[in-house]
Image (cartoon, grey):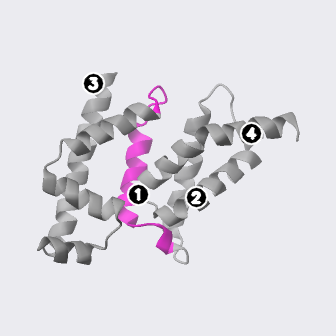
Amino acid sequence: MTKEHQLFTSFIRQYQATLRSYIRGLGVFSHAVDDIAQETFIVAYKELEKFDQSLDFGHWLKGIARNLVRNETRKHARHNRIMNDKLTLFLIDSFEQSYEVTFGEHQEVNALKECINALPLKSKELIGRKYHMEDDTQVIAEQMAMTPTAIRLSLMRIRTKLKQCLDFRLSYEQ
């Protein structure tokens, strides 16, 4: 194995968990996260010569992953890898607009956990069912005695609150 291969292998080990979490956070079904992470590393390896070493490697990987997920939302044949096109595109755009290279991923994850913990119990339950358990909106509606439209509106409001909370917490930590 060449020195370049060894270095790239160490980058994979260093960034794979963070990259997988990031991809999942963009709204990709859990069963497809590994595929997109692998595709990200393949693209990165092929484009390694173009990487500006003065930049953050993790941020560069996330940019590649964002582009792959964005392309995924445009493909109808593989549409089942993305939970919700509009949500995923919203999250991609949000990360592109607000991501600061100086922030570590741990601050973002911790801030999100704090924001989720600050939600009312019913909101936490709804987020957990939709994004952790990956329940269908219809199933959640039946279990929570709500209409599917009410579930979708509630999720939209919760995501908005989480984004505002994240923006506040992350700007406060600067």
Amino acid at pointer 4: Phe
Which residue is drawn at the image coordinates 44% and 43% (left, top)?
96
Task: Tell me if 3 is positioned left or right of 170 in this view.
Answer: right
Which element carries disc 3, helix, strand or loop? helix
Q: Which residue is mark 3?
A: 172
Single out the mark in the foreground, 3 or 4.
Answer: 4
Within 10 Å of the Cα at label 4, are there few (<14), some (14-19), or many (20+) other Cα atoms? some
Q: Which residue is mark 1?
A: 89
Single out the mark in the foreground, 3 or 1.
Answer: 3
Cα distance between the residues tagged 3 and 1: 26 Å
* Residue closest to the eye, 120 or 64: 120
Single out the mark in the foreground, 4 or 1.
Answer: 4
Q: Give the mark nearer the N terminus: 1 vs 2.
A: 2
Q: Which residue is mark 4?
A: 8
Amino acid at pointer 1: Leu
Q: Position of residue 165 (x, y in %)?
A: 23, 39
